[in-house]
Amino acid sequence: MKIAIYCGTAFGESPIYKEKAIQMVHFLKSKECSIVYGGSKVGLMGVISNEAMSLGMNVYGVITYGLADKELENKNITELHHVETIRERKALMEEKADAFIALPGGFGTLEEITEIFTSIQISDSNKPCALLNVNGYYDKFLEFLRACEKEGFLLKEHIDAIIVSDSIEEIYNSFKNYTPPRRKWDILKAK
């Protein structure tokens, strides 16, 4: 299984983020998974790609020429794809991956994973996605999604389709048993 990993180019304030990223890579190695990620050598992205390569895993990076020009690319991975735009980067990562996990990150991470949530909501994608909720990082984000539901802008079934755990093993097992939610329009028609 190829897992797309979305995460930050920072390490975060607590060492737990780096520790969980490394634990995740070791678990995915034990399940013979490959990693698709944003191609960077810095922050959590660098931790994940370097750890995976040290374990002999296949690591596929996708990076924009603009970021590569800033010497942020990790050239020591299995395959590195260069694209013009962030949109192309996301599309290629989505195409290559069988499932998606977001670790803690900033705007880019949130934008990437919410695009996958949107694709699932409108049935452009049936691939599972998860939030690795390290140290409760995504708790406030999940509260926000529930507030969107309460206000009538999101449907419960789509929020519930997001796999959330601080355990990579739980996430992986959920991937294996994943059933995509109904399309937004089908749910609304049934009401």
Image: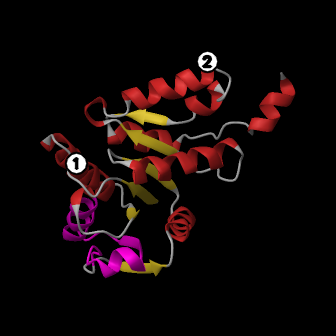
Residue range corresponding to the magenta coloring: 45-74
Question: Percent position (x, y) of residue 127?
Answer: 58, 51
Using the rendered view, name the quadrant where residue 159 is placed. top right
Up-down: is 51 above or below 84? above
Instruction: Residue 23: give its label.
Output: 1
The residue nearer to you, when weighing 10 against 17, is: 10
67 within the magenta span: yes
Mark 1 crowdedness (10 Å alpha carbons): few <14, some 14-19, many ≥20:
some
Q: Looking at the figure, which quarter contains the C terminus?
A: top right
Type of amino acid at the residue the image marks with label 2:
Lys
Local secondary structure at mark 2: helix
**Res 142 label:** none
Q: In the image as oriented, which residue stretches furthest toward the right?
A: 189
Tell me residue 41's x, y (percent).
Answer: 24, 69
Can you name the residue that lies furthest to the top here?
Answer: 150
Please report the residue visible at 30 percent of the width from the left and 59 percent of the height from the top.
Answer: 29
In the picture, measured across the screen, residue 102 lies left or right of residue 87, that is left
Q: Which residue is mark 2?
A: 150
Residue at the image position 46 percent from the left and 28 percent from the top: 142
Q: Position of residue 166 (x, y in %)?
A: 32, 34
Viewer can see residue 78:
no
Percent position of residue 22, x then y: 21, 52
Q: Is residue 69 above or below residue 31?
A: below
Marker count (numbered): 2
Q: Secondary structure at mark 1?
A: helix
Magenta-drawn stretch contains 145: no
Q: How far apart are the alpha carbons under marks 2 and 1?
A: 36 Å
Q: Which residue extends farthest left?
A: 15
**In the image: residue 99, left or right of residue 155:** left
